[in-house]
Image: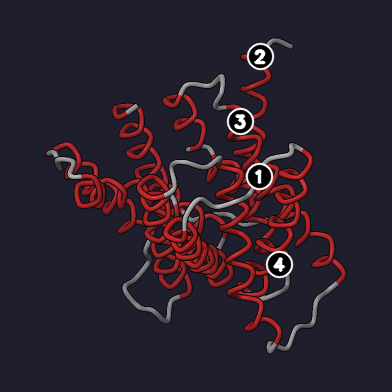
Amino acid sequence: MNQSKLALVEIHTAVFLFGLSGMLGQMITLSPLVIVCGRTLFASFALLILLKISKTTIRIHSVRDLTMLVVIGVILAIHWFCFFQSIKVSSVAIGLITFSTFPLFVTFMEPYFFKERLTVSNIIIAVSVFLGIFLVIPSFDLNNRTTLGVVWGVASGFTFAVLSLLNRRYVNSYQSTIIAFYQNTVAALVLLPMVLITDIEPQVVDYILLPFLGIFCTAAAHTLFIKSLRIIKAQLASLISCLEPVYGILLALVLLGEYPTIRTWLGGVIILGTISMATFRRS
């Protein structure tokens, strides 16, 4: 297999594993707080082993960089809590589709972070995405579980956008694996005290799925994705990443029997289609 084909296999495997995390979050019986703590803890250990094997130094250059890595780690914990909370209160489809709104937030926050101009096309993209969200929401009642899931999902998209922009602005002098290690470690340490005072009753399935989620769907997927970018162009990588909710929804449909409503399908197509076209234009 040549390098180009291998890189395609790597990036599709990574995106598939990212999409799989939504279904695993639904299957694990633990609370979102415990899921995120466990995921980041296992991912942190796996990444540390990987860094040690590759003999990569994990030393941080300055106190400012370390401070920003801590802040970003806290935001990562909030992002994943919102994501799994969305899935738990609604469905895998709702959680993945609404999380996919994060490029919209990036579009509107980039001008503030990087002094970039906001264009008419960006506003049109925003309107289209909001139309998709409107279709996904069955009613504007927070007692409705789907609506609540949309709120948590959009919150996960927003926090992921903030996470992406902070990474771009403040920590551009370290390998992505090092950044991921510190972020996951901080997230785990922040959540661990709360988990220790939580009444936890794990099932047998949790002992299998939680390590899988942390090691394969986080540490391994991140490593494969970064490795593939040595060959895959940014444009193609961005478009392939849009398959994450597609993989996740199909897995949930086949393995969990979760059938999204027509409104969810339609809203999802509008959101993902708009994001895909915007990504293609900007790449």
Name which residue type carries label 3.
Ile
Mark 2 and mark 1 residues within 8 Å of each other at the beta carbon: no
Distance in Å between CA atoms under marks 4 and 3: 25 Å
Task: From the image, tell me which residue sits under label 3.
Answer: 11
Task: From the image, tell me which residue sits under label 2.
Answer: 3
Q: What element does badge 3 sit on?
A: helix
Q: What element does badge 2 sit on?
A: helix
Residue 214 in the image: above or below residue 50: below
The residue carrying pointer 3 sits among few (fewer than 14), some (14 to 19) or many (20 or more) residues within 10 Å by Cα, namely: many
Badge 3 or badge 1: first in the primary sequence: 3
Task: From the image, tell me which residue sits under label 1.
Answer: 57
Badge 4 or badge 1: first in the primary sequence: 4
The C terminus - image quarter: top left
User: 193 left or right of 1?
Assistant: left
Mark 2 and mark 3 residues within 8 Å of each other at the beta carbon: no
User: What residue is at 60 percent from the left and 51 percent from the top?
Assistant: 59
Q: Residue 209 carries which label?
A: none
